[in-house]
Amino acid sequence: MGRMSVPSTTPLQATQSGVLREIQSDVLFNASLWVNIALAGAAILLFVYMGRDIESPRARLIWVATLLVPLVSLSSYVGLASGLTVSFLPMPPGHPLAGEAVLTPWGRYLTWTLSTPMILLALGLLANTDLATLFTAITMDIAMCVTGLAAALITSSYALRWVFFGISSAFFLAVLYVLLVEWPDDAAAAGTGDIFGTLKLLTVVLWLGYPLFWALGTSGIAVLSTAFTSWGYSALDIVAKYVFAYLLLSWVADNEGAVADVGVRLGGPESAAPVDD
């Protein structure tokens, strides 16, 4: 399941009903989507409940950013399960599956483009980083996701797929630099170093899994099937999003004062100002 041989005149986008039938016929692939839909729905209800007593503006902003992660995921995974954001794409010459139309769930990149910036926003607020560094991390992250989407959608050249993969990886390195070098010192100064260290490690380790599955899956060298790759992405999403969000919100709910009184930083430490100024 997940690929088919087609004439060269087959359009890139199969009919939505045809894609839906293919998704539903592949039980393993279909299950990888619905498991995430169910968990995203449960996470939304849990996070709404967990944030019910959070009052300070900064803590509430962290809560809203975190809540948006499963909200975006729920919408995106429904799009995938319905076939709306899935296409049959012919693999380019040189690809291990050259000439075959492979079921490509490109809608995952929409999920990551909208949800991962919220993860970084929550982490940046937790660390009390300055706005310039926060903006840098978020824009590098968005660029990483968009160029990753380009790598998955290219059907004209196998080499160009890897070129875009390399560009996406370069943006990813910039995000890793911020997470591993810039923000730990900010978090230590803000008194949130312990929880930030846990969430940073969780995020970095899991996010490294995404390009690995891309490279090994049908978008790359096709060692892994579409269904297996989908389960890999779904498993990463479950921990990197819902488990991450639960740990963060649990800490914020129990330590609201640690983030409530932190100032907004426009630049370096000397630019700190009260939240309500």
Image (cartoon, rainbow, N blue to C red):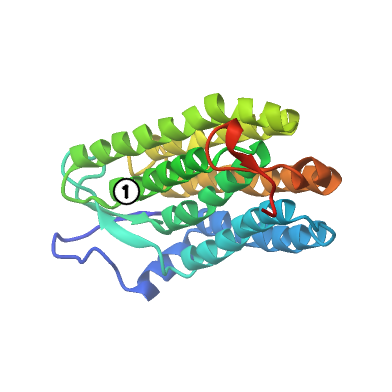
Please, what is the three-letter code of the amino acid marked with disc 1? Ala
Residue at the image point whose x is 21% and y is 66% from the top:
11
In front: 135, or 273?
273
- Location of residue 209 in the rendering, given as x and y in whole percent from the top left corner: 50, 34
Q: Is residue 263 left or right of residue 251?
A: left
Which percent across, then down, holds residue 260?
A: 77, 47
**Relative image position of residue 114 (x, y in whole percent):** 49, 56
Can residue 255 be seen?
A: yes
Q: Quadrant of residue 170?
A: top left
- Identify which residue is drawn at 47% across, 49% down: 227
Q: Nearer the viewer, residue 10 or 51?
A: 51
Reply above or below: 6 against 228: below
**Place of residue 37 in the rendered image (x, y in percent of width and height, measured from the top left):** 61, 61
Q: Residue at x 79, y 42 (%)?
A: 251
Mark 1 neighbour class, 10 Å CA radius: few under 14, some 14 to 19, many 20 or more: many
The residue singled out by tag 1 in the image is 152
Q: Could you tell me if residue 96 is visible in this image?
A: no
Horizontal side of residue 167 vs 127, given as left or right: left
